[in-house]
Image (cartoon, rainbow, N blue to C red):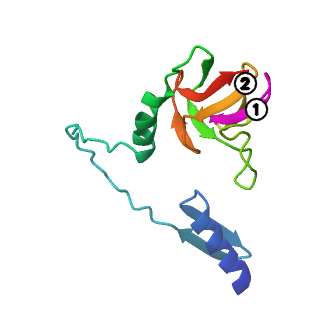
Amino acid sequence: MEYKELKKLVELVENAAITHLSIDENGTKIEIKKEIQETNSVVLPQAAVATPIAQPPVAAAVEQQEPSAKPKDKNVIEIKAQMVGTFYHSANPDSPPFVKVGDTIKKGSVICIIEAMKLFNEIEAEEDGIIEEICVPNESAVEYGQPLFLIKKG
């Protein structure tokens, strides 16, 4: 048996799930054994420790803006998040925002995107009107029912 063949056999044993290889070829016996080191790992139970989780700055920004999201006029309506996810002003970072404050919108026009579970959901205007306020910063987390826009009916 040549060196190359022997080397292949050693590599086979190293990489395979076998621990022993024995070959008898033309009176030449080759035996390759691989030792398996058993590791006994003991997992000790640990007491659960409650650690305070720092609230992300995004949530703080949302909380600061929510009080201003109350419509002051009967002609002003809120467009609220219909799902939990991430709010985006535009289709991608290089695109202009769907709407800006002061823009006139038509019912059914796309005004933002909410990403939920890796799906991008287009949010459409519920009525014709003018964008009075964008209540959520771009790329921030939104909750179900959270105001996204204030729209003046028109």
Answer yes or no: is residue 120 visible: no
Dominant secondary structure of the magenta stretch? Answer: strand
Quadrant of the image occupied by residue 103: top right
Counting from the top left corner in percent of width and height, residue 42 is at: 27, 47
As drawn, is 154 to the left or to the right of 101?
right
Q: Nearer the viewer, residue 137 or 82?
A: 137
Identity of the residue drawn at 72% across and 33% down: 111
- Helix or strand or loop: what does disc 1 sit on? strand
- Helix or strand or loop: what does disc 2 sit on? strand
Q: Amino acid at mark 2?
A: Gly
Counting from the top left corner in percent of width and height, residue 108 is at: 80, 23
Range of residues picked out in magenta: 104-117
Identity of the residue drawn at 55% across and 43% down: 137
Q: Earlier in the sequence, mark 2 or mark 1?
A: 1
- When the figure is inspected, residue 40 is found, relative to residue 111, above or below; the finding is below
Quadrant of the image occupied by residue 9: bottom right
Identity of the residue drawn at 60% across and 65% down: 15
Query: Circle 1: is it few (<14), some (14-19), or many (20+) Cα within 10 Å?
Result: some
Circles 2 and 1 in contact, beta carbons < 8 Å: yes
- When the figure is inspected, residue 80 is found, relative to residue 34, above or below; the finding is above
Residue at which label 1 appears: 104
Q: Amino acid at mark 1?
A: Thr
Q: Quadrant of the N terminus?
A: bottom right
- When the figure is inspected, residue 35 is found, relative to residue 140, above or below; the finding is below
Answer yes or no: is residue 41 visible: yes
How far apart, in angstroms, are the residues tagged by discs 2 and 1? 6 Å
- When the figure is inspected, residue 26 is found, relative to residue 133, above or below; the finding is below
Magenta-span inclusion, residue 44: no
Magenta-span inclusion, residue 114: yes
As drawn, is 60 to the left or to the right of 135?
left
Residue at which label 2 appears: 129
Counting from the top left corner in percent of width and height, residue 153 is at: 69, 19
